[in-house]
Amino acid sequence: MMFVPGCSWTAARRRSPASFFQPAPPAGCPVHPRPLPPRRRPRRAHLLASLHVPADSKVLKPRADAPLDRVVCKFGGSSLADAERIVQATKLVKMQLDSSRQYPVVVLSAMGSTTNDLLAAGEAALRDGVVDSTAVRHRAYDACEHLRLDREMLVEPLLVQLDQLLMGIKFIRELSPRTRDYLVSFGERLAVRVFAAHLLYNEGVPARHFDAFDVGFVTDSNFTNAEILSETYDNVRRFFERIIGVQTLPVITGFLGKDRHGHITTLGRGGSDLTATTLGAALGVTEVQVWKDVDGLLTTDPRIVPTAMPVADVAYEEAAEMAYFGAKVLHPVAMQPAMRFNVPVRVKNSYNPEAAGTVIRRRDAPPADRPVTAISVKRHIHLVDIVSTRMLGAHGFLARVFACFATHQLSVDMVATSEVSLSLTLDQRAGHLERQDAIVHDLQEIAQVSFSSARAIVSIVSNVPKSSEILARAMTALHREQIEVQMISQGASKFNISMVVSDGEAETAVRALHEEFFERVPPPATVTPANGTAGETARRRTVKETR
């Protein structure tokens, strides 16, 4: 280790993470006021002593007679925003020790706004040549200080690597998707180290942190939006059998993986949910618990309808439809491992743990008393109308249209067709005029193309057998508000009915539909012995009179 003349022993030590365990400084160099630990002192005993916790402190264990076998607990960024929220999250983990026969598996997102802070630091290094990780560093330091953890051992090595990366971005002037994934990975990696250390040294729980790629998560090389490969499931099972066992509570990074070349990848925003359900599927856990800042899945966005209500349980397909069309509580792809391996997912509120939350599970039949599960909205989409007489009876027309959108990397949400026209919706990435002009140019030989911006998709996640009744009531509710429906489509799964309206009318449409399906009290049915309900008798009379 090299010493810079005139610099303090502390500053010299921080030049290398490994220098934490170096011997005393040479004569004449200013000495840090806090004594260094003996070089050969066991790490656990040292840390317990520095945290004022006896080395023989009682280790908390799960209950042998608990009702659940094992659960995965996933905590999002808002549940880890600061030291106070971390303490609350660890209390929720400890609660699982009373209800599970094995230690839970904990999956974490980055703390608070760390991901955004990392991206901002990368852009500043690229654009302005400024290396500044202050926001990330202060959040990590504050958490360690309030939790009485040794920041130099826990987070300083990673922060040194972060500064080195930002320095590289500054000089190379490059922030590729691969580099961006490596950059944002520091958020989750810092979080698991702080969380596991707090459990171990402050709460007496034998926790240990792991990065997901070390546990066995292998992805493709589609950086910033990687896909988990099937070999991950076997990798995870083997790792738990060989390394983790039953005497350790693992705290694992969400959101991350590595491709087959060893490069860190990310699963896209919200990918920590996918990490949790993948772990749950691989390990065959009793349930996956996703702890958010809302009381489970709600009937609609509470920012639009303050009276939105929690939904007790939904089918996997319903949850997936809600996620695809605007509900941000769960990552859309996160349902796939749970559906495939039939692992229930429970969405709970870390700010209100007493709330029952929502259970997402396989269901044989929809509840007869609930025609609609939820109403979701997706804003700022674009409606595309494609008209061509060549479409009539022609083969390959649709293939050419969709190949055009694939070329421009645009995802189609809704589709409706007639004999000579095709209407579809694209997300806000289609808003650039250059991209729209390119699409019109590519399709002008076979069709006339028009774009309509400022549109929204309002989706009704519903009971399949009652879709006709639901559609009739929805149209009536929207007609009362004089809202024009510009396109309508029922998904192949039959679990959703989606309508396109003007973006400015989207919130009014959501309120009208929520009132129709969740707030209106249907009149009580009057039963007559011979003819069933009075309403049914009236309907028969009307049909008879019109014949």
Image (cartoon, grey):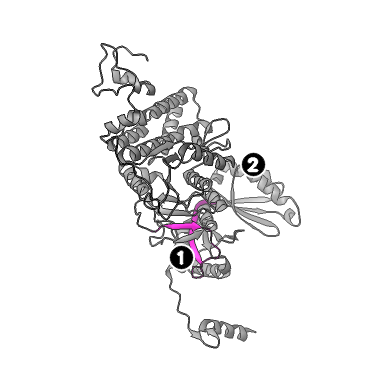
Q: Residues within 10 Å of mark 1 (few under 14, many from 20)?
A: many
Q: Which quadrant holds the C terminus?
A: bottom right
Depth check: give the residue in front, 64 or 439. Answer: 64
Q: Which residues are magenta?
A: 356-381
From this viewpoint, is residue 176 visible?
Answer: no
Which residue is denoted by mark 2 in the rendering? 407
Which residue is denoted by mark 1 in the rendering? 512
Residue at the location (32% across, 33% down)? 141
Depth check: give the residue in front, 383 or 197. Answer: 197
Q: Position of residue 283 (x, y in %)?
A: 51, 46
Please tell me whether residue 343 is drawn above or below residue 42 in the rendered image.
Answer: below
Please tell me whether residue 478 is drawn above or below residue 401 in the rendered image.
Answer: below
Please tell me whether residue 118 is drawn above or below residue 457 in the rendered image.
Answer: above
Figure quadrant of residue 417 = bottom right
* Residue at the bottom extreme of this rendering: 530
Residue at the location (58% across, 83% down)? 540
